[in-house]
Amino acid sequence: MKKITALLLALLMTLSLSAALAENNPYAVTEPITIEWWHSNEDQYTEDINVLCEKFHEQYPLITVIPRYIGSGTVLAENLIAAHAADSVPAVSQVNVGYLAEYFDSGVCTDLEPYLEAYGVDKNDFVKGYRETATRKEDGHMYSLPFLASTQVIYYNKTVAQNEGITLPEKWEDMDAFMQKTTKFNDDGTTARWAMIFAGWGAQYFETFFTNYGVEIIKEDGTSGVADEKSIEITKQIREWIDKGYCYWAYGSGASTNMRQHFWDQEVFGVVHTCSLITTYRDKINGAFEFDISGFPAVGDKAYTLLSGNHLVIPKKASQAQKNAGFLFANWVTSGEASLFWAEISGYMPGRYSAMQGEAYDALIEKTPAYQGMFAGVDNILPQDSRTYYSSCTNEWMKSLGLIFCENAPVEATLQECAERINEILEDL
């Protein structure tokens, strides 16, 4: 009887505390509400998304979250803008990081600062590059929470590394020796195993190799630096490695698929790709060999990569009740064990330092040790350039590098022509 009485007293105290918190928090949820979460996660994640929403409902029984798959990231972005114009928005929506700055400035997203303060969320707990991406420069406030955070990494064959005494280069100046040591040739001189495959079908995969080296895609004077001395130097170096059979530049139709297959077939030691596919790599390898993850080799003190993925936003035109419930869901799903659950099934990284510790984190590392290498470099992840014209410039550059590395186009002339095209884009601004 005493135990029952004690439990009842504890329950009453908890309810009283909850009521007090609700009374003092203008953003508390005090009545049942059903909200929509718009996302772009494809069919393979449907069951896991439903599990996430159910787990959230168990902890927040007043809130029911209905997940809705809208389409690709681009389709979702278009639908969110249309919903904003029609005053018919969801409570929470994913947004690709490339759209965030524009959405913040155009008033699509709710300022989350009051909610973060009301619930005592420490902004410094968010990984630095993710927090910068979530922050509107004009007022320094956060308008989004990182959900599907990813970056570029080097997947490598750890078994081969151990058996052959291969060390991943920590510095760019070590790359040449690494390429020579790791490449294997057939008797006829053709490549039997490449040291590396560079992903060349998206600028985010290779951009920081160049910018860490000192290349300025767009210089302070408003012109492009893709044909400057530093750019020519590193482009020639990569071209030399390709000509020697040490590596190749994956570009064009099927580039990603072919690159991954080479890795799974152990025809390449390391590949540059997105960390969000770590579970795919793990499952496809299926124990045939052990793999691991490395960051990019540093140039001086620079070993940066770029943030990709999606954040969660709360549309500004949502009702206050929707916003209150939406923030609780967005905050929960991007923190703690919920974010580690999502990391395990999707390969995307948690956005907070606090998630990268504790028993749940240890369990994740035990299941997939390569996560440890992935998390080790989170402070080297930079926000993407948010200027609306930037992708047009890097697309021109990407096409030119494809010509140089895949079709043997002359380095200096091709880069000069590329710089001229980018300058035309910049002059029209």
Image: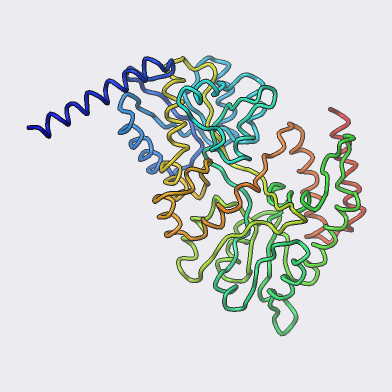
**Residue 395 locus on image (x, y percent):** 76, 43
Please tell me how many numbered marks the rendered image carries: 0
**Residue 232 locus on image (x, y percent):** 88, 55
- Name the residue nearer the viewer: 404 or 170: 170
Residue shown at the point (74%, 52%) measured from the top left: 302
- Classify the position of the N terminus by image quarter: top left
Residue shown at the point (34%, 37%) measured from the top left: 55
**Residue 309 locus on image (x, y percent):** 58, 41
173 left or right of 29 in image: right
**Quadrant of residue 259 in the image?**
bottom right
Color theme of the render: rainbow
**Residue 7 locus on image (x, y percent):** 17, 31
- Classify the position of the C terminus by image quarter: top right
27 left or right of 197 in image: left
Residue shown at the point (68%, 77%) measured from the top left: 184
- Name the residue nearer the viewer: 376 or 287: 376
The answer to whether residue 68 is above or below residue 266 is above
- Name the residue nearer the viewer: 127 or 233: 127
